[in-house]
């Protein structure tokens, strides 16, 4: 297991874009794949109003109105035409991202903490405080769902891995469980030392990244064996691997800094301050040019992988004197 090392000094002054609009902590972020030459960012927030934004700029596109409780998870379909959200109002909802309309609303017996949508956009998987997984078929929304039980505590994260025909679930019982989609039986498991706080599959599908306590785990997405684990000095809430698999970004529930690490060595390369509360969620864009962070302070911040490069709204802004400007609800800091 790699151990923490002193990071290098910041390579240059970093100017994140701050996306305002949410009124409570931002708890989950996800970028879509590149579609029609661009990509999108969706956010889940305890204010109950998930938001869709233009990925490269952070410009607000729309707010999905309809939940009556905190939204814990928000994800986009592969073509970004649908969104699926999981909420404390005991529902998982599927949305039309062009109109903002609710297409389907699926009731549960308790708080839903995570949901994901299949690659073809026809089925969703959900999990939460009921400790069970449910699959809903959007082509047969009125039929009984497929269910699976096994977790002993709240399920915090679910992932639909269509390439391997499995779904992944993880949660407070310290386990990642792998379920065969054909039988919906459990076929593998990974046990951590602490409750698992986040889980995602890397952009190329090779790695499962997860966090538990102060440790970041990288698993082989085919064998579910640990490739490496990296010990940090703080409670890690979320981690995202860069698309080139050479670095990753991490945020912490007991730390206000955004931290960048070298994947191979586990060395901390950079750290940046900007948020005024713990960081709950981080995510790299599909082109790797930026990463997004969501915080207890109710804001989303977009950071450049290469500070100073002209990209999106960063048109040589890094070379200007520090000031604040309002640009479609985004302030440059």
Image (cartoon, helix red, strand yellow):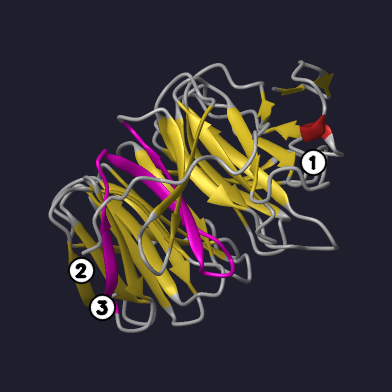
Mark 1 or mark 3: which is in front? Answer: 3
In the image, the segment drawn in magenta is 224-253
Asked whether residue 144 is in view, the answer is: no
Which is more toward the observer, 119 or 245?
245
Q: Position of residue 137 (x, y in %)?
A: 52, 64
Give the mark nearer the N terminus: 1 vs 3: 1
Give the mark nearer the N terminus: 1 vs 2: 1
Secondary structure, magenta segment, majority class: strand
Q: Residue at position x 39%, y 57% from top?
A: 158
Q: Residue at position x 87%, y 39% from top?
A: 315
Crowd tier of the residue under label 1, counting other residues whose Cα lies within 10 Å: few below 14, some 14–19, many 20 or above? few
Q: Is residue 236 left or right of residue 63?
A: left
Q: Residue at position x 54%, y 43% from top?
A: 29
- Determine if the magenta segment contains residue 252: yes
Asked whether residue 91 is in view, the answer is: yes
Secondary structure under tag 3 reads loop
Q: Position of residue 286 (x, y in %)?
A: 66, 60
- The CA span between labels 3 and 2 is 8 Å
For label 2, the residue is: 190
- The CA span between labels 1 and 3 is 42 Å
What is the number of the mark on residue 73?
A: none
For label 1, the residue is: 99
């Amino acid at each position: 297991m790699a151990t923490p090392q002193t990071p290098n000094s910041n390579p240059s002054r970093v100017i994140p874009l701050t996306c305002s609009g949410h009124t409570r902590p931002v708890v989950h972020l996800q970028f879509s794949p590149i579609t029609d030459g661009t990509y999108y960012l969706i956010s889940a927030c305890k204010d109950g109003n998930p938001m869709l934004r233009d990925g490269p700029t952070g410009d607000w596109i729309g707010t999905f109105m309809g939940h009556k409780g905190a939204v814990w998870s928000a994800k986009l379909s592969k073509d970004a035409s649908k969104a699926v959200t999981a909420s404390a109002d005991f529902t998982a909802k599927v949305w039309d991202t062009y109109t903002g309309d609710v297409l389907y609303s699926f009731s549960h017996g308790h708080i839903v903490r995570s949901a994901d949508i299949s690659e073809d956009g026809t089925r969703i998987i959900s999990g939460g405080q009921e400790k069970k997984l449910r699959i809903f078929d959007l082509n047969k929304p009125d039929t009984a769902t497929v269910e699976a039980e096994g977790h002993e505590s709240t399920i915090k994260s679910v992932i639909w891995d269509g390439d391997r025909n499995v779904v992944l679930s993880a949660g407070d019982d310290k386990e990642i469980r792998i379920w065969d989609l054909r039988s919906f039986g459990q076929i593998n498991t990974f046990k951590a030392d602490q409750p698992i706080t986040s889980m995602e599959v890397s952009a190329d599908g090779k790695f499962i990244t997860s966090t538990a306590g102060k440790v970041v785990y990288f698993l082989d997405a085919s064998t579910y064996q640990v490739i490496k684990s990296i010990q940090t000095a703080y409670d890690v809430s979320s981690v995202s691997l860069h698309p080139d698999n050479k670095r990753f970004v991490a945020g912490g529930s007991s730390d206000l800094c955004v931290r960048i690490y070298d994947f191979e060595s586990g060395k901390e390369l950079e750290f940046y301050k900007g948020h005024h509360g713990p960081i709950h969620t981080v995510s790299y864009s599909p082109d790797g040019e930026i990463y997004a962070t969501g915080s207890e302070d109710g804001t989303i911040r977009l950071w450049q992988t290469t500070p100073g490069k002209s990209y999106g709204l960063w048109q040589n802004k890094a070379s200007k004197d520090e000031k604040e400007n309002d640009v479609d609800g985004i302030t440059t800091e």
